[in-house]
């Protein structure tokens, strides 16, 4: 009989717990979509997004706004899972080029590998691990005077939301992190610990229009949080109890707004967006098209006002009169599309 000590060190992959495992790291089939394509198709058919997979939103609408053509130069300022980027790349060929940016080094490496395997070499695709506000410097480094097409999708990708290790969500317990680039800056837990109560009130009000900002800020200074579950539980308990006694749906919205406000502050998202919008006209060639996807009112207001101001000043020849929303069919198939807003602008010939 073979000595157990000499048995093969190979370990069998753990079986799914039940038909649909709940924990992110247990969903190994969804996390390996190329190997388990049939299983991923079943998840998609059910109207859900497979774990660790990003479903690009309003791809057809984005392409209609941008109209990428063979030979043109495009910039995808938030490459993410590469859904929009790949669709644009396909329409730039032959002879076109996509300059892709993303602040998340983890997802950038994964997406670049997927696009390289799809046949997009260095002559048609270059990638840069920088925030979208760094577009002017990236174009200058590439020797590009201006792009014909620019896209920015400001949403948090499903890969980031679903992974509890990143701390963006409270479905599963995880560290209260929320950094788009995990190797830079301070975590949400550190931000909460060093900020005084007044600063937290401003953050919750300005970043998320949270009506209970004062009470939430006071609580979080009295009871510091280190995990996503701690933060969710404390806010939920506070607003479900006297004197608030809020309905469950209202409590859930406040929890979401609290997480949103923290994420925006941790990643300095509004400052990055403001800088991007100011420098955008210099990055677009005359007649160049830009499309921006936003996911909450603070972002959309900034984009709308910047486009309208540019139109009045003649910097943009035309801008979207109305916001574009996802279709009913897409929203049913992908619930994360429900909050998306798309706006576009076309560069004029006047210098900004």
Image (cartoon, rainbow, N blue to C red):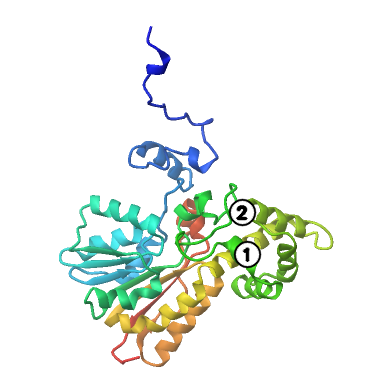
Q: Is residue 320 visible?
A: no
The residue depicted at 37 percent of the width and 79 percent of the height is 345
Task: Tell me where residue 227 appears, x and y as whole percent.
Answer: 62, 53
The residue depicted at 47 percent of the width and 73 percent of the height is 323
User: In front here: 100 or 167?
Assistant: 167
Task: Tell me where residue 73 appears, x and y as whole percent.
Answer: 23, 72
In which quadrant is the C terminus drawn?
bottom left
Q: Earlier in the sequence, mark 1 or mark 2?
A: 2
In which quadrant is the N terminus drawn?
top left
Task: Tell me where residue 26 appears, x and y as whole percent.
Answer: 49, 37
Q: Residue furthest right?
A: 243
Q: Quadrant of residue 106?
A: bottom left
The residue depicted at 37 percent of the width and 10 percent of the height is 2
User: In front here: 215 or 324?
Assistant: 215
Q: Which mark is residue 303?
A: none
- Label 2 near label 1: C-beta < 8 Å? no
User: In front here: 321 or 36?
Assistant: 36
User: Circle 1 sits on which residue?
Assistant: 257
Q: Which mark is residue 228?
A: 2
Q: Secondary structure at mark 2?
A: helix
In the picture, measured across the screen, residue 205 lies left or right of residue 87, that is: right
Task: Tell me where residue 235 appears, x and y as whole percent.
Answer: 71, 58
Q: Is residue 138 visible?
A: yes
């Amino acid at each position: 009989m073979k000595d157990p000590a000499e048995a093969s060190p190979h370990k069998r992959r753990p079986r799914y717990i039940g038909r649909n495992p709940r924990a992110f790291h247990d969903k190994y089939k969804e996390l390996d979509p190329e190997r388990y394509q049939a299983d991923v198709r079943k998840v998609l058919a059910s109207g859900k997004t497979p774990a660790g997979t990003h479903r690009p939103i309003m791809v057809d609408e984005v392409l209609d706004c941008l109209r990428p053509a063979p030979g043109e130069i495009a910039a995808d300022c938030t490459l993410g899972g590469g859904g929009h980027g790949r669709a644009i790349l396909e329409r730039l060929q032959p002879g076109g080029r996509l300059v892709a940016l993303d602040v998340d080094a983890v997802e950038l490496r994964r997406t670049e590998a997927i696009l390289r395997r799809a046949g997009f070499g260095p002559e048609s695709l270059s990638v840069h691990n920088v925030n979208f506000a760094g577009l002017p410097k990236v174009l200058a480094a590439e020797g590009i005077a201006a792009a014909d097409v620019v896209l920015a999708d400001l949403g948090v990708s499903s890969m980031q939301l679903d992974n509890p290790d990143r701390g963006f969500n409270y479905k599963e317990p995880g560290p209260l992190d929320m950094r788009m680039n995990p190797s830079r800056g301070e975590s949400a837990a550190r931000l909460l610990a060093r900020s005084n109560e007044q600063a937290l009130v401003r953050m919750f009000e300005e970043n998320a229009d949270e009506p209970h900002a004062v009470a939430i800020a006071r609580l979080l200074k009295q009871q510091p949080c280190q995990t996503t579950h701690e933060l969710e539980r404390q806010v939920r308990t506070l607003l479900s109890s006297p004197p608030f006694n809020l309905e469950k749906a209202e409590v859930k919205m406040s929890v979401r707004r609290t997480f949103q406000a923290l994420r925006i502050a941790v990643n300095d998202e509004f400052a990055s967006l403001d800088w991007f919008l100011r420098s955008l006209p210099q990055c677009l060639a005359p007649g160049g098209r830009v499309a921006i996807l936003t996911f909450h009112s603070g972002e959309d207001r900034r984009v709308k006002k910047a486009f309208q101001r540019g139109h009045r000043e003649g910097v943009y020849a035309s801008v979207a009169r109305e916001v574009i929303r996802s279709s009913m069919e897409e929203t049913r198939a992908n619930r994360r599309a429900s909050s998306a807003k798309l706006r576009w602008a076309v560069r004029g010939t006047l210098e900004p």
